[in-house]
Image: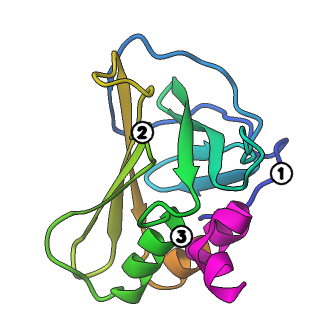
Amino acid sequence: MSGLVSPAAAAPGAVKGSWGCRPPVHNAGVEPAFVLHLPPESGRLAFGPIDDPYGDGYVGRFEVELTDDGLTATTTATIGVFAPGQLDEFLDSLADDWRGWDGVRRWHSLNRELVIEATHDRTRRVVLEVTVQPDALVPPWSAQGRFEIEPGEQLAAIVGEVAAWLGPYATRHRSSS
């Protein structure tokens, strides 16, 4: 199940899942503006509100928190209005190809603090491998989570929710303005 969840409902509980991680991972507790709860089990990917650090509307920063199996990894991701391939555009391309594709498709934030790799089994699921790491040339740590999504309605709903969360940073917003 995916969806926007109120911050109170988004509080992580006991969780299970498959994770790979290199310590040290810090636990910061993001106040979520957008949360995806995705299978398997109860993994959680939370995005905080987008901040415009320079006040120019071109660069946005937001906290990202990946939680599962007792691990919480948090970093700050950077996106840009005119950066090629916004997150909503990436997810929309996955939804458009709901019947499947070959290989791995990738999206990353400007400084690669958030990386999403997508594969499709050409039958019933899209697998998102999410990596969270600090902004560094050689990150001292990274955390990875694996989420399975139904490629039809569930993925289409996520696309709309992510575009709404991105607001002026969304590809759809720029093309409709």
Magenta stretch: dominant SS? Answer: helix
Point 33% across, 22% down: residue = 139
For the residues carrying marks 2 and 3, which lies nearer the camera in this image? 2
How busy is the neighbourhood of tag 1: few (under 14 within 10 Å), some, or many (20 plus)? few
Point 20% across, 63% down: residue = 104
* Amino acid type, residue under disc 1 in the picture: Ser
Q: Quadrant of residue 118?
A: bottom left
Q: Are marks 2 and 1 in contact (CB under 8 Å)?
A: no
- Mark 2 → mark 1, Cα distance in angstroms: 28 Å
Q: Are marks 3 and 1 in contact (CB under 8 Å)?
A: no
* Amino acid type, residue under disc 3 in the picture: Asp
Point 44% across, 46% down: residue = 110
Q: Which residue is mark 2?
A: 111
Closer to the camera in the image, 113 or 27:
113
If you read the primary sequence from the N terminus, does the residue marked by circle 2 or circle 3 appear first? 3
If you read the primary sequence from the N terminus, does the residue marked by circle 2 or circle 1 appear first? 1
Q: Quadrant of residue 147?
A: bottom left
Q: Which residues are magenta?
A: 159-177
As drawn, is 18 to the left or to the right of 162?
A: left
Q: Which residue is mark 1?
A: 6
Helix, strand or loop for disc 3:
helix
Helix, strand or loop for disc 1:
loop
Please tell me whether residue 136 is drawn above or below residue 93 in the rendered image. Answer: above
Point 54% across, 39% down: residue = 77
- Mark 3 → mark 1, Cα distance in angstroms: 21 Å
For the residues carrying marks 3 and 1, which lies nearer the camera in this image? 3
Closer to the camera in the image, 169 or 74:
169
- Residue 84 pos. (x, y %): 41, 65
